[in-house]
Amino acid sequence: MKSEEIAKIAGVSRSTVSRVINNYSNVPEDTKKKVLEVISKYNYQPNTSARVLAGKQNDTIGLFIVSIADTDNPNRLYNNNYFTQFVDAAVECANARGFYVLVNIIYCENDYNKVSEVFLQKRIDGGIVIGTEREADVLINVSKRGFPVALIDYDAEEIKKNKSDNNNLIVIGSNDYEGAAQAVEYLISLGHKDIGLLAGRLSTYSGRQRYEAFFDTMKKHGLEVDKDFILHGDFIKSKTANEVKNLIQKDKFPSAIFSSNDDMAITAMDLFKENNIKVPEDISIIGFDNIPLSSLIRPALSTVSTPVYDIVDKAVTELIANIKRNKKGFFNYSYDTKMILRETCSRK
Amino acid sequence: MKSEEIAKIAGVSRSTVSRVINNYSNVPEDTKKKVLEVISKYNYQPNTSARVLAGKQNDTIGLFIVSIADTDNPNRLYNNNYFTQFVDAAVECANARGFYVLVNIIYCENDYNKVSEVFLQKRIDGGIVIGTEREADVLINVSKRGFPVALIDYDAEEIKKNKSDNNNLIVIGSNDYEGAAQAVEYLISLGHKDIGLLAGRLSTYSGRQRYEAFFDTMKKHGLEVDKDFILHGDFIKSKTANEVKNLIQKDKFPSAIFSSNDDMAITAMDLFKENNIKVPEDISIIGFDNIPLSSLIRPALSTVSTPVYDIVDKAVTELIANIKRNKKGFFNYSYDTKMILRETCSRK
DNA sequence: CTGAAAGCGCTAACAG
DNA sequence: CTGTTAGCGCTTTCAG
């Protein structure tokens, strides 16, 4: 079924059919009704490719999830409790606004080219990139070519430097520095002095923010950081497990740990349990992200929640506004985090 | 940048550019190389809409996730530990085969029309539908119109009846009846007689299979089923919680429960814990699906694992084969489940 | 208000 | 082996 057939049946021209489909104002109610009836009767749907080729938008946004980690694990993302939230939220928000979502996963540096490809092939009107590494350049270039891009978990300041003329870039994130500082302050307020850090991948913005906040806060309180208590989990389960096992082997032990995300905190807790180290009696731990799992495990994990849903919703909304040319420019939004106290931290 | 410009620069015609893009055999190495160089130099990517309109495939499959549940919960899917696995697996498998994935969520009966729309608009070459309700007809009609469709968690027998001439339908699932029977047998072998059922939504195929297997197995062993021990959780957290709370109020209690999925089992366990009912000392429980969370909670949940990844991989592979016209016809595949014994079942 | 006609960027006969 | 040409199904001027 194509618009020409609809036109013939309705006794009008293709143009008129097109006009009613696109809701033009200058078509009389009668004609409109007549055409609509035929369309509905024959279950006609316009061919998207033809519409796009003729100048319409695609009404689809690309969701790019960077998951450069655990490359030896065939299940990768599959096991990542953090990103799945983004997929769900993005699809839900976009669908609610009449947009489709093309989901892409970036497993390796090489995959970054996929991003530009998808744009260049005009498969999408705009894209959201999450959890990105340093390869911001690729994305900034894409946006400079006129394609709207929303970046989540990115250093807005650094981008602002290079962007200058960028009209299609939206940077959205949470105030992780403040959130992490607050968590460490909390641990300190509980009387902890020997505090360890389970650090995330420093090539991510959030990884760096949480890392720096930890050291700054410790310093602010005149607390020494024992190098042996700095574990580089890099947001990767297997790495985290190795680092924690190493720590357990040592003859000294922190009384509390600030973990840069919940996944790593949970991995550590499992290992603690295996080794009869009690949380929070023997060691306190606080995570970051407030993934669904964190409230389900026992003891329930104290953590810092980032408003994932709000962030994604903002990303989708702003991206669509940019696509529709309502709102061009460089925008930067940042959301506050919130400490969620549960059962894994106790007074020293 | 369009193919004509590439042609001009490379000193050939558009057709030749098209030929090298589509890897035709009748292009001499030299010409090919020359064109490829220009393409790569200018970072040219063919416009997908134009290609599709000219008769090429879209190289994208639609993933439709039915989530008719908890409609009052704004986070819906977001909290569903089962479906996220499907999204990840599907994207990974499809990407690996050079296909893109358009993810759609079906929240209500009305959304079923979205499925046909996406097909009719030619946004996708084929679709995978998961967790479907009775509205199979919509999908079967879609496939009858020539669009390849893969159905996961569907009653293949029932479909076979109506399909007869269907050439584009693939039905994939796991042998849930056998898996559920095995789980109940296990509970019985542990000495349990008063066994309860946490039933899933009976409008899903898996929900029905697991339900029937429970009753059949109990009957086979001459065991009575107490009506008060049949809880209709419908795969929905809030409903499950209500049913379990009701049960706890009663003066009689089963010594074991077979839960039609892990999510409901975990909800029940949380309630048991709140009410000082110990698992597995006071009550044994076994779930279904083996979601990631089930191994993380304590006590770790005994369950029946379905090979999600295999199922999705098969769905993607077969769907693509059908799209590429290598393999037309009606196909039905079913995978065995596997009991995973952990810590929630004990001898009566 | 509405039809005719051009054109979006590509592929695929067809001819040479 | 390669260029020319005719669409693919739609939107959008441009006339009327």
Image (spheres, coloured by chain):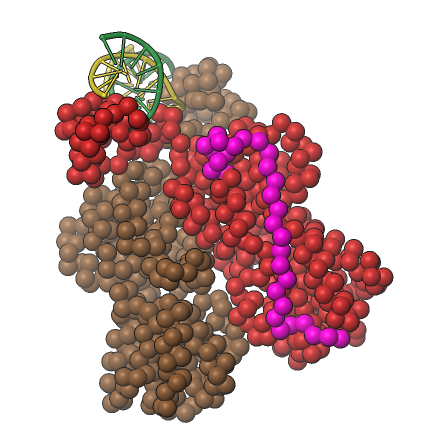
Chain colours: A red, B brown, C yellow, D green
Q: Where residue A242 sits in the image (x, y, percent)?
A: 67, 65
Residue A218 locus on image (x, y percent): 79, 60
Q: How many marks?
A: 0
Q: Is residue B189 above or below residue A87?
A: below
Is residue B109 one of those drawn in magenta?
Answer: no
Query: Is the residue A124 above or below the residue A96 in the image?
Result: above
Which residue is painted at 45% across and 53% down in the image?
Answer: A88
Residue B246 in the image: state x and y as whole percent.
Answer: 37, 81
At horizontal 30% and vertical 26% (from top left) the residue drawn is A25
In what quadrant of the picture does the C terminus of chain B appear?
A: bottom left
A334 is within the stretch colored magenta = yes
Splitting the image into 4 quarters, where does residue B239 fall?
bottom left
Q: Position of residue A283 (x, y in %)?
A: 71, 74
Q: Quadrant of residue B311?
A: bottom left
Q: Quadrant of residue D6?
A: top left
Residue at 50 percent of width and 47 percent of height? A313
Residue A35 seen by the camera? no
Q: Is A178 placed left or right of B121 in the picture? A: right
Front position in the image: B136 or B325: B136
Q: What segment carries the magenta color?
A: A319-348
Can residue B307 be seen in the rendering of this structure? Answer: yes
In this rendering, position of residue A242 left or right of residue A118: right
Left or right for A271, reference B215: right
Residue A251 drawn above or below residue D15:
below
Instruction: Please name whichever residue, A194 or B110, is drawn nearer the observer in this view of the structure.
Output: B110
- Residue B181 vertical position relative to residue A177 in the rendered view, above or below: below
Residue beneath the point at 45% across and 61% down: B79
